[in-house]
Image (cartoon, helix red, strand yellow):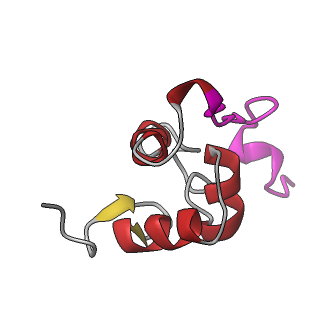
Amino acid sequence: MCDDKVFVCRCQEVTVEDVKEAIKDGATTVAGVKIRTHAGMGLCQGRSCGKIIARMLSEVESPEKITPGSSRPPARVVKISEFLEVK
């Protein structure tokens, strides 16, 4: 038994209930859930919640049909000093 108020994505505060609703509304991929709930768009970029969402999807969809989500790390590291005005 799972509590629907448990956070799946802590970064965006997306709950089990939110993911279930997205699946009920037609999401069949991790990306589909991401679009509907914003899960995976926080600081961790889905590293924490992506596998949980895929597992939840596998309960209603054939695991072979579930495409993994994509994580997009920053293009390059930028130092804070590059944003500061240095005189």
- Would residue 3 be found to the left or right of residue 43 on screen? left
Q: Nearer the viewer, residue 80 or 28?
A: 28
Q: Quadrant of the C terminus?
A: bottom right
* Vertical position of residue 87 compared to residue 74: above or below: below
**Residue at image point 61% right, 45% down:** 30
Q: Which residues are magenta?
A: 65-87
* Vertical position of residue 64 compared to residue 11: above or below: above
Extreme left residue here?
1
**Residue at image point 64% right, 31% down:** 65
Q: Nearer the viewer, residue 45 or 23?
A: 23
Tag count: 0
Q: Nearer the viewer, residue 48 or 36?
A: 36
Q: Nearer the viewer, residue 56 or 37?
A: 56
Q: Quadrant of residue 34?
A: bottom right
Majority SS type along the magenta span: loop
**Residue at image point 41% right, 48% down:** 56
* Vertical position of residue 45 compared to residue 85: above or below: above
Residue 33: percent from the left, percent from the top? 61, 58
Q: Quadrant of residue 36?
A: bottom right
In magenta segment, residue 69: yes
**Residue at image point 50% right, 41% down:** 50
* Vertical position of residue 6 compared to residue 28: above or below: below
In magenta segment, residue 72: yes
Residue 62: percent from the left, percent from the top? 53, 33
- Would residue 2 be found to the left or right of residue 84 on screen? left
Residue 3: percent from the left, percent from the top? 19, 69
